[in-house]
Amino acid sequence: MRLKSILTLLGPFIALLVVFGIFAGNNPRMLSVEVLLNILTQTVIVGIAAIGMTLIIISGGIDLSVGSMIALCGVVAATLITKDI
């Protein structure tokens, strides 16, 4: 019973480490600081959206527009970054 509770709690992290280990074994560059920072930077956006969706679902509502709002913000940000002012 204890093993089941540990796997329920740590299972996703263990799976993430296994997948990361497979990719790092195939490409040693995967362990560089630049790649790790890039992975963390890209997952922050999804993490923030997941926290927001969790709060919406807990409050009893369902909002499917979060993905499209993230896409819109990305397009606006990319447009502003590339625009010469």
Image (cartoon, rainbow, N blue to C red):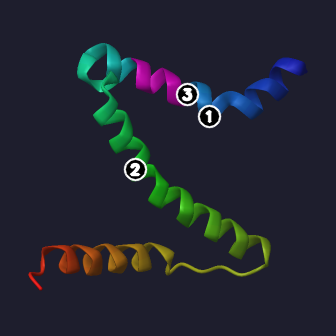
Can you give x and y, in whole percent of width and height, for residue 83 in the image? 12, 81
Residue carrying label 2:
41
Q: Residue furthest left?
A: 84
Magenta residues (range): 15-21
Q: Is residue 49 visible?
A: yes
Q: Nearer the viewer, mark 2 or mark 1?
A: 2
Against 49, residue 47 (above or below) is above
Residue carrying label 1:
12
- Give the number of callouts: 3
Name the quadrant of the C terminus.
bottom left
Q: Residue furthest bottom?
A: 85
Q: Residues within 10 Å of mark 2 (few under 14, many from 20)?
A: few
Q: What residue type is disc 3 on?
A: Ala
State how far apart marks 1 and 3 are (Cα). 5 Å
SS label for mark 1: helix
Q: What main secondary structure does the magenta stretch of the protein show?
A: helix
Q: Earlier in the sequence, mark 2 or mark 1?
A: 1
